[in-house]
Image (cartoon, grey):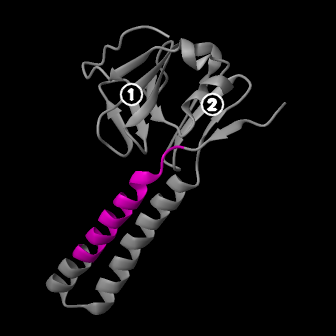
Amino acid sequence: MPLPQRFPYHRRAAATVAVFLTAMDIFLAAVIYAVSENWLLTIILAGLFFLVDLFFAISALTTAHEVGEDYIIVRQGWYFKKRIALKDITLVQKVKRGPFSYGMHWLWDSTRYVNGSRDDLILIEENGQDRGGCYRVLFDVLDRDGFLRAMKIDPLKVLEVPELNLSGKEKKGG
């Protein structure tokens, strides 16, 4: 059985998020010191905040989506992993532009948005719901057409919509 193909997702927003989290760590350290006037407590808590931020950043930067013989795996760091059997996929759609966000979020009641970019996304819907209630996944990948080809889908035959319909009712196609 051949190894699954790995497809990294966009990382350009990671730097912005890292700068924001570092600024928040500095702000929280200043607040802790202002309230407690205890340098040791401030250093320990600021160090813990920084380690958590570092852990989230490294895990997101070292993971990628996968396409195997009969499944795909969509990931976002260590905190989200969804395996979908290719036979269970009922809809594949290209989405030119998605909602603004970074990371992993719920959209509507059954769609997970897993992204590092809001441009050139893939929407996959599977038949039925899984235990977590997620049966649609919207995600980005650096090589969108390569990902679709690895799924044995011709990228030219997949419907591309300019934006995701925020009502949660996407047009069927693909």
Q: In this view, does 90 lie above or below 68?
A: above
Q: Does the magenta stretch include residue 20?
A: yes
Tell me if mark 1 has few (under 14), some (14-19) or many (20+) residues whose alpha carbon lies within 10 angstroms of its own: some
Q: Tell me what residue is drawn at x 63 percent, y 17 percent.
A: 153
Q: Which of 114 and 174 is in front in this view?
A: 174
Position of residue 60 measured from the top left corner of the image (x, y, whole percent): 50, 53
Position of residue 35 measured from the top left corner of the image (x, y, whole percent): 15, 82
Residue on which the image places disc 1: 96
Q: In which quarter of the image is residue 132?
A: top left
Secondary structure under tag 1 reads strand
Q: What residue type is labelled 1?
A: Lys
Q: Tell me what residue is drawn at x 55 percent, y 12 percent.
A: 157
- Label located before the other in sequence (2 or 1): 1
Q: Is the magenta stretch mostly helix, strand or loop?
A: helix
Residue on which the image places disc 2: 146
Q: Quadrant of residue 21?
A: bottom left
Secondary structure under tag 2 reads helix
Tell me if mark 2 has few (under 14), some (14-19) or many (20+) residues whose alpha carbon lies within 10 angstroms of its own: some
